[in-house]
Image (spheres, rainbow, N blue to C red):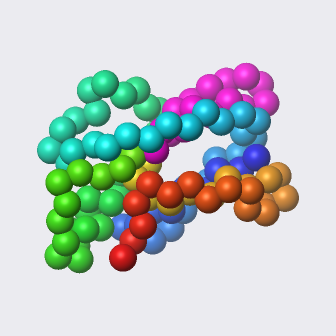
Amino acid sequence: MILKIERYVEQDWWMLDDIRKINKRHFEQPFNKDFEEVQGDIFILDYGEYLESNGNGDSSRRVVQLICRTSNNNEFSVLFDTVAYLCNDEGKTIEKIVANYKD
């Protein structure tokens, strides 16, 4: 499978492939608090900067954590606060995973 994560500020995408299994959870994270209790290998946290650049403000954001396992059984953790698409190996969307929408 392919995981495609949108970058709100740079207006581009992160793409990760060779994924065979995903575990998902989400949580609320205040903007003024560090990620002390959550481990992650990849952080894509654009929502706060996106809100600030558009004159909006919130006190917290929803964050999605995905634990991904590759075909060689390596695991990595991705945290993001934007939108991601889980696609099959041909690139067709299987699931849309939303943390926070752009307005």
Residue 88, position in %: x, y?
A: 80, 53
Q: Is residue 101 magenta?
A: no
Q: Residue shown at 17%/65% (left/top)?
A: 57
**Residue 19: x %, y % from top left:** 72, 39
User: Would you say residue 44 is visible in this rendering?
Assistant: no
**Residue at (61, 33) in percent of width and height:** 23
**Vertical placement of 67 versus 50: above or below?**
above
Q: Nearer the viewer, residue 28 or 12?
A: 28
Seen from the viewer's position, the closer of residues 27 and 78 is 27
The majority secondary structure of the magenta stretch comes to strand
Figure quadrant of the C terminus = bottom left
Q: Is residue 56 shown left or right of residue 10?
A: left
Q: Looking at the picture, does residue 3 appear above or below residue 13?
A: above
Image: magenta residue range: 64-78
Position in image of residue 15 (x %, y %): 62, 54
Q: Is residue 69 magenta?
A: yes
From the viewer's side, name the closer residue of 24 and 50: 24
Residue at 44% in and 54% down: 99
Residue 94, quarter of the rendered image:
bottom right
Residue 102, position as x, y percentages in the image: 39, 71
Say how many tags the image has.
Answer: 0
Q: Is residue 92 visible?
A: yes
46 lies left or right of 64: left
